[in-house]
Amino acid sequence: MAEPLLSIRGLKAGYGDFQALFGIDLDLGAGEVLALIGANGAGKSTLLKAIVGLVPCGREMVSLRGEPIGGARPDRIARRGIALVPEGRRLFRSLSVEENLVVGGERAKPGRWTLETVFRLFPILGERRKSLGTALSGGQQQMVAIGRALMANPDIILFDEISLGLAPVVIKDIYAALPAIVATGVSIILVEQDVSRALGVARSFVCLQEGKVSLAGLPSEHARAAITAAYFGMRR
Ligand SMILES: Nc1ncnc2c1ncn2[C@@H]1O[C@H](COP(=O)(O)OP(=O)(O)OP(=O)(O)O)[C@@H](O)[C@H]1O
Ligand SMILES: [Mg+2]
């Protein structure tokens, strides 16, 4: 197999004395969508935060194109092409849609994502470009958060719970945008509560349980019952 774009080896991380992750291994190929699943508190968000430098980890634990980047400063990791769409979206509420997107594009690598292409992906954002973050629905805020990540022209986007708390019709719109993003060559790690939805769009998956990988592979390789067991930690 060709060298993965992103490679995680033996990743341990936590918060002060509390260890949340106990030796995670994961490979993400170029143009791949990987679903990261697991019950509440399994460590999914912590893993995404460690990848982007928001939670400390050892240098050799995360490699991008074979180069160790673990524990580097978040702005450095962002500039090397990894973007996080965090849980809860975290927009600048006093800025307009357009201003939020422009912030995401500051010091961006050149690439195909611009205000114009983001507005083509999510036309409602173009219509509401002058609206403040506070005036948007939850779904529209999520679209801005995704657009803001795209504006950096990253090679990898980490999505933490993109559909949490959104209406089904909005979730459909957001998921409908994923193929267009992947078609531009972006690789994705997708954290999603809805396992069926996540496995439906992903090529591969990693299931975490209490800070360890409980199962990984291709969705088609494992029986649904085995995935459910790995998710909830049931003995079979
Ligand atoms: N800032 C923090 N300080 C201390 N402990 C934390 C912090 N954030 C998370 N934890 C703990 O780390 C563990 C992993 O949490 P994490 O948020 O990564 O799980 P998760 O899989 O994303 O869960 P969820 O599905 O609820 O989002 C949990 O035990 C959690 O309580
Ligand atoms: Mg989480």
Image (tube, grey):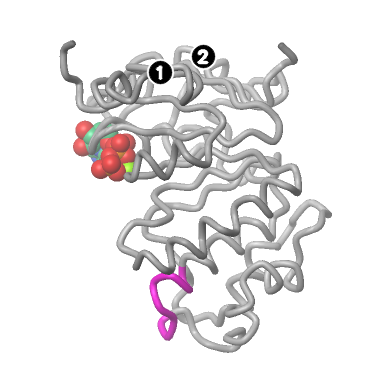
Tell me which label, 2 or 1, sits earlier in the chain: 2
The residue lying toward the viewer, choosing from 224 and 34, is 224
Image quarter where ligand 1 lies: top left
Instruction: Identify which residue is drawn at 42% across, 86% down.
Output: 135
Q: Residue furthest left?
A: 235
Q: Examine the rendered structure and indicate whether residue 34 appears above or below residue 25.
A: below
Q: Image quadrant for the N terminus?
A: top right
Left or right, residue 25 beside residue 194: right
For the stretch drawn in magenta, the main secondary structure is: helix
How dense is the environment of label 1, judged by Cα within 10 Å: few (below 14), some, or many (20 and up)?
Answer: few
Which amino acid type is shown beneath numbered disc 1?
His
Residue range corresponding to the magenta coloring? 134-141
* Residue 215 location (% of width, % of height): 37, 17
> Of the numbered discs in the image, which one, if any, rests on residue 222?
1
Instruction: Identify which residue is drawn at 70% across, 20% down.
Output: 67
* Residue 25 location (% of width, % of height): 48, 16
The residue lying toward the viewer, choosing from 88 and 17, is 88
How far apart in space, not on screen, are marks 2 and 1 (Cα)? 23 Å
> Of the numbered discs in the image, which one, if any, rests on residue 9?
2
* Residue 40 location (% of width, % of height): 23, 38
Instruction: Identify which residue is drawn at 61% across, 63% down.
Output: 147
Q: Secondary structure at mark 1?
A: loop
Which amino acid type is shown beneath numbered disc 2?
Arg
Instruction: Identify which residue is drawn at 70% across, 62% down.
Output: 105
How dense is the environment of label 2, judged by Cα within 10 Å: few (below 14), some, or many (20 and up)?
Answer: some
Q: Secondary structure at mark 2?
A: strand
Left or right, residue 143 beside residue 233: right
